[in-house]
Image (cartoon, coloured by chain):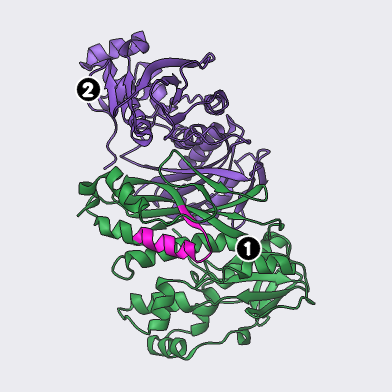
Chain colours: A purple, B green
Amino acid sequence: MSVAKVGEFGLIARITTRLPVGPTVLLGPGDDAAVVTAADGRVVASTDVLVEGRHFRRDWCTAQDVGHRAAAANLADIAAMGAVPTALLVALCVPADLEALWAEGLADGLAAEAGLVGASVVGGDMSGSPTLTISVTALGDLQGRAPVVRTGARPGDVVAMSGRTGYAAAGYTVLSRGFRTPKLLVDAYRRPEVPYAAGPEAATLGATAMVDVSDGLLSDLGHIAAGSGVGADVRRDAFDIPRQMRDAAHALGVDPYTWVLAGGEDHALVATFPVDTALPEGWRVVGEVREGAGVTVDGRAYKGPTGWRHF
Amino acid sequence: MSVAKVGEFGLIARITTRLPVGPTVLLGPGDDAAVVTAADGRVVASTDVLVEGRHFRRDWCTAQDVGHRAAAANLADIAAMGAVPTALLVALCVPADLEALWAEGLADGLAAEAGLVGASVVGGDMSGSPTLTISVTALGDLQGRAPVVRTGARPGDVVAMSGRTGYAAAGYTVLSRGFRTPKLLVDAYRRPEVPYAAGPEAATLGATAMVDVSDGLLSDLGHIAAGSGVGADVRRDAFDIPRQMRDAAHALGVDPYTWVLAGGEDHALVATFPVDTALPEGWRVVGEVREGAGVTVDGRAYKGPTGWRHF
């Protein structure tokens, strides 16, 4: 049944009954606004929007997948501040002929991804629109830590990464060429695996700067470099290219390092740390902060694309 | 110059330099997420989305007007919980040929409306889209008060209103018939005048339930009735119809009470109070809570439209 037939209030009712309410929720969906815990007296907040045809395609991803991706993009921003996500709010714009089941699947995906970190979908809005659009706001709790911003990297710091890059971009390329495998890459595009816990961990370890890789490693590390007034160098040999990625790159005539260095949407966390920091498992040194400006690869300017263009 | 020419990062830079940073902002735009004060350990959060052609028209409203309206719709939701707004986050989806000046004007309008209550625009996201879409999330601080929800109205309570209804709906009707006056009504549609301070005031006075009138008085009061398991009756003679509205209604062949009782988007606050509550200036009794279900007008079922259909 289409969303137009179910109606706005009907659809909201169908969706809100599917949303589990976690311990951070003092008042959930159904009122003018939600009330969420913000235990340390501050709240971290970030918004990301996904537009059909630009950020997702319904023939490439299930509704649940899109929910996971939309939530992950936002939750990763919260983690990249060193915070723990507490809540999501979702503005959903839907064509009148969209199946209500699709909207319900989206809500399931959003709630499931949020549930991975103990966060809940607490509210939102819905409207008709010719363009299927999902705007998500994530809230988070710093639990007493200072936020890790983009401006604190210093020459001599190491650049370290938790999570992976290139998988989602490879999956995107595979899908855009009409293939549905390798599963490793396509699944990575559909449902990113974000190292959420590494964000607060990095803050506790004394990270001097941190971002999540949403646009591409070189592009997002470039934000740290620009924000901190430093340069950064990334070592190509710090990255393992898994066999499936190497094979897919070979078959498609692509340099796999383009995926790894410039592909976004895996939402790895990249942080800079004082050089003597003992990095726990999950963090890997991939480069270093230098005097200067811009991001180089193996000491040289990078010629390829560095990230994703949004319009 | 079009947004496509200015580019995403260029446009974000242009916009963020225009945004004043208020006292609630610990970390403003430019990082993965913003950090906002949440002094009482809870945060109130609400999201509303505006879609071009459905919620606004660029030939009826300036970019600044749309910013005011988008902010007002969200800030009113925060006020309707009894909270004081602290921050807005904005997801903006723009056609590639949109003038960058329009986006800047929108940001000015959002910031100006937020500034009325001491809140700031702290972050957001931007994407290309065929459909101009503005999704706003507002955050707020309860300052130690209990949130005023929709479920607490009790038979015998009075229904009181702060702010006005029907003005924006009348302005909308005037504009949709091709007129640009009366200014009182058209301006009310373009930039709602929301009684923000009345929200926390009602909470302090002991309001048993509260909503903002975004869809229409009868429709939104219906949410309180349904949520509280009660009925409500509204008295037509509690509403003053100003001369300009009466004249416009006469000229257009409309019953002005349709605007007043069923018109949305002025974002009046409607609350229920124990009958012996001494209501300060700005609050007016417009009806009463009764046993039963549904909302009546002068004791009878209302035959006209009660609110706005979203798709």
Residue A236, image x, y percentages:
31, 13
Q: Main secondary structure of the magenta part?
A: helix
Q: Name the residue under label 2.
A: A301
Q: How many marks?
A: 2
* Quarter in which the C terminus of chain A is drawn: top left
Q: Is residue B55 visible?
A: no
Q: Tell me the mark number nearer the camera, choosing from 2 and 1.
A: 2
Left or right: residue A146 versus residue B160 is left
The residue carrying pointer 2 sits among few (fewer than 14), some (14 to 19) or many (20 or more) residues within 10 Å by Cα, namely: few
Residue A46, image x, y percentages:
48, 43
Q: Is residue A105 visible?
A: yes
Instruction: Provide the chain ID for the residue under circle 1.
Output: B
**Magenta span contains residue B112:** yes
Q: Mark 2 is on which residue type?
A: Ala
- Disc ID at residue B223: 1
Nearest the viewer among A202 and B221 is A202
The segment highlighted magenta reads B106-121
Q: Quadrant of residue A263?
A: top left
- Assign a secondary structure to mark 1: helix
Q: In which quarter of the image is residue B63?
A: bottom left
Q: Considering only vertical position in the picture, is B56 above or below A71?
A: below
Residue B187, image x, y percentages:
40, 77
Nearest the viewer among B20 and B124 is B20
**Magenta span contains residue A259:** no
Left or right: residue B87 versus residue B62 is right
Q: In which quarter of the image is residue B295?
A: bottom right
